Amino acid sequence: MDSIELKSDLHNLIDKVNDETILNAIRAILAKQLSDTDFWNDLPVNVQESVKRGMTQAKNGQTKDHSEVMKKYEKWL
């Protein structure tokens, strides 16, 4: 099936769907595919700040080994 046939098939399938949840999901997937932005701008500001802080800490060598962290939190796992 080439891309023209595939698009036609998708159009036909979408025309038969009446569930708005499914249609909104398809719309979101396609909109994201066509978007020039990445998910970074969709993240809450506090999450962006946390990631930036973590990246700065990593650059400054302020990290811990995975095994060290796992040992500390093993009682909750």
Image: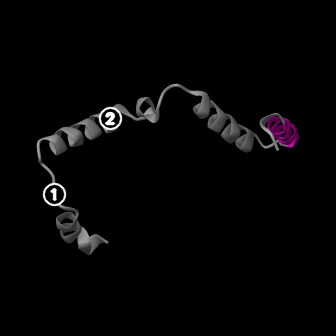
Q: Is residue 72 left or right of residue 28?
A: left
- Which residue is identified by label 1? 64
- Which SS class for mark 2? helix
> Residue 6 in magenta?
yes
Q: Quadrant of the C terminus?
A: bottom left
Please state the horizontal and vertical placement of residue 53, each as a whole percent of the image. 21, 38
Name the residue at the bottom extreme: 75
User: Which residues, given as a range, are shown in magenta?
Assistant: 5-16
Taken as a whole, is the magenta stretch helix, strand or loop?
A: helix
Please state the horizontal and vertical placement of residue 73, each as a whole percent of the image. 23, 68
Q: Is residue 44 left or right of residue 58?
A: right
Q: Quadrant of the N terminus?
A: top right
Choose mark 1 or mark 2, whichever is in front: 1
Please state the horizontal and vertical placement of residue 59, each as a whole percent of the image. 16, 41
User: What's the mark number on residue 48?
Assistant: 2
Q: Is residue 38 left or right of residue 4?
A: left
* Coloring scheme used: one colour
Q: Is residue 76 left or right of residue 68?
A: right
Give amino acid for label 1. Answer: Lys
Give amino acid for label 2. Answer: Gln
| Mark 1: few/some/many CA within 10 Å (<14, 14-19, 20+) | few
User: What's the mark number on residue 54?
Assistant: none
* Residue in view at x 83 percent, y 42 percent: 17
* Residue in view at x 16 percent, y 57 percent: 64
